[in-house]
């Protein structure tokens, strides 16, 4: 086993441990008002950027999600018009893959595997998406490999949809924020349209039980937003 394979295995093991800690966390419950607010606001933001880039007609689009978890966002794309047979997800955690298959409609493909080596042909997908995957990866080489694979399987006129932390979380050493410079490094020679979204989770958790209007106003100001929603395309 060469050094790269050792590093990949080590990072994969670390990620498995990190995600195991998050299972069942109350902050991700649909009965948590802050989680509901953040999800609904992000849904609006995603639909807005897809519409702005003329990607609102999803019926014939082939979609791949990296780190799909239980398939929540893949099912959202189906709700927005994508056909299940055109929707594919991949995740490194077998238990999440099993849950995704149980929860998702027939025809949707969910694979267990490492995104550094995608088992798909080049130029296979119109849209490749990732939600808070890269901030959970601390090894820059692993990030670069996944980014190259995302571009490899993307069609020439396709888009990458990126959603991830731009700031570090002082209380969580398992994640690392990714600023514009790093995203540009990961996707060289690409056009990247950045949007700063999602009110800081601690602030949202504090305010949401009392005032959704307050959360909405603060998020629209964008000063306290902690994530980038980006659309990446080849120049």
Image (cartoon, rainbow, N blue to C red):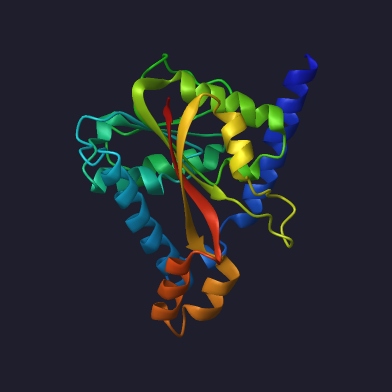
Query: Is residue 171 in view?
Result: yes
Image quadrant for the N terminus?
top right
Residue at 35%, 27% (x, y): give it.
158
Q: In the rendered image of this protein, does residue 204 appear above or below residue 175?
A: below
Q: Quadrant of residue 4?
A: top right
Residue at 62%, 45% (x, y): give it.
179
Furthest residue in direction bottom, as rendered? 210
x then y, percent, for residue 97: 47, 38
Query: Is residue 32 in view?
Result: no
Q: In the rendered image of this protein, does residue 102 appear above or below residue 224?
A: above
Residue at 57%, 73% (x, y): give it.
203
Q: How many marks?
A: 0
x then y, percent, for residue 38: 44, 64
Decide which of 172, 6 is in the foreground and name it.
172
x then y, percent, for residue 28: 51, 63
Q: Is residue 60 left or right of residue 167?
A: left
Q: Quadrant of residue 183?
A: top right
Image quadrant for the C terminus?
top left
Q: In the rendered image of this protein, does residue 41 appear above or below residue 142?
A: below
Decide which of 231, 24 is in the foreground and name it.
231
């Amino acid at each position: 086993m060469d050094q790269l394979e050792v590093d990949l295995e080590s990072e994969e093991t670390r990620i498995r441990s990190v995600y195991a800690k998050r299972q069942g966390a109350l902050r991700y419950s649909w009965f948590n008002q802050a989680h509901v607010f953040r999800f609904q606001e992000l849904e609006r933001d995603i639909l807005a950027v897809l519409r702005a880039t003329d990607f609102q007609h999803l019926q014939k689009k082939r979609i791949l999600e990296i780190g799909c978890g239980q398939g929540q966002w893949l099912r959202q794309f189906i709700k927005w018009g994508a056909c299940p047979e055109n929707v594919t997800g991949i995740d490194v955690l077998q238990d999440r893959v099993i849950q995704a298959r149980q929860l998702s409609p027939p025809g949707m493909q969910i694979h267990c595997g490492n995104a550094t080596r995608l088992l798909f042909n080049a130029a296979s997908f119109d849209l490749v998406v990732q939600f808070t995957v890269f901030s959970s990866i601390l090894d820059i080489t692993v990030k670069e490999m996944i980014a190259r694979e995302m571009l490899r399987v993307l069609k020439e006129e396709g888009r990458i949809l990126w959603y991830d932390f731009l700031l570090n979380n002082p209380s969580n050493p398992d994640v690392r924020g990714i600023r514009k410079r790093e995203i540009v490094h990961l996707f060289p020679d690409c056009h990247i349209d950045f949007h700063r979204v999602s009110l800081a989770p601690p602030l949202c958790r504090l305010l949401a039980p009392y005032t959704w209007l307050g959360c909405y106003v603060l998020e629209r100001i964008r000063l306290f937003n902690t994530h980038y929603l980006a659309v990446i395309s080849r120049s």
